[in-house]
Amino acid sequence: MASALIVPPPPGSEAAALARRLSAVLDDPAITRIVVAPPPERESGENPDAFFGAVVGVLMRHERLDVEVAYAAPEATAATSVYGLPHGEAARELAEHGAAQALPLIRDDAATVLVGRARHRGADGEALVGETYVDSERLFEGRTRAVQIEPLTVEPGVRGRVQRRLPGGWLTGRAVQTGGANLVVEREGVLTPRTVKRSTFYRHHLDWKLVRP
């Protein structure tokens, strides 16, 4: 098994540089695993899960989900919690010697992969006004602080809950869809300021291969 280390490119042309790096890796038939190794958030100012998700998103869009992915997380994150992954030295050891497992891949309608946590929020810090469904079951209607969304390691693939001071229970399904008058989307702690009428996180038709304990 041959692996390739993927780290964030220098600031300035991150998306283009990442695409070039991954393209070169994917063109090498000997590479069967990539190791995603972002720096800690205190060094980069970015949640490590955001880079991890961006890498998996490139694999999805290039239809190369056959490649195994290992996450050498520098610190505990939402993704390490979701997938039961270590961080630090233990994560690097797992990336080198661990086995990959096929898991549901969760994406949204903007072709962005979710590896840790997303939220549907109201714009400008206001309450979200709208409604959310998990598959055909209504999660909320009216006003709420936010809707929290996370991937699952098992079917049906994704879960959502209303975020309150005392959060309610999770609903699980293949998709979490929110519509609202002032809806904005937060992915891996990164807020997209543009208001949208609808956002859906759902299970991709293909699984991905994640190295897990």
Image: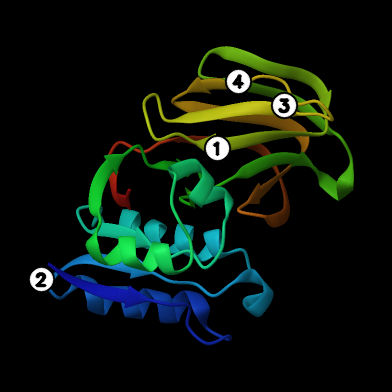
Which residue, given by chain and number where applicable, does mark 3 sit on? 162
Residue 136: x and y in percent read 53, 13
Q: Residue at x 44, y 44 (%)?
A: 84
The type of residue carrying mark 1 is Glu
Q: Secondary structure at mark 3?
A: strand
- The residues tagged by marks 1 and 3 sit, at their Cα atoms, a distance apart of 12 Å
Precedes in sequence: disc 4 or disc 2: 2
Nearest the viewer among 73 and 206 is 73
The type of residue carrying mark 4 is Tyr
Query: Is residue 108 visible to the viewer in this orientation of the structure?
Result: no
- The residues tagged by marks 1 and 2 sit, at their Cα atoms, a distance apart of 33 Å
The type of residue carrying mark 2 is Pro
Precedes in sequence: disc 1 or disc 4: 4
Which residue, given by chain and number where applicable, does mark 1 sit on? 150
Which residue, given by chain and number where applicable, does mark 4 sit on? 133
Given this view, does label 4 or label 2 mark the residue nearer the observer?
A: 2
- The residues tagged by marks 1 and 4 sit, at their Cα atoms, a distance apart of 14 Å
Q: Residue at x 52, y 68 (%)?
A: 74
Q: Secondary structure at mark 4?
A: strand
Given this view, does label 3 or label 4 mark the residue nearer the observer?
A: 3
Precedes in sequence: disc 1 or disc 3: 1
Given this view, does label 1 or label 2 mark the residue nearer the observer?
A: 1
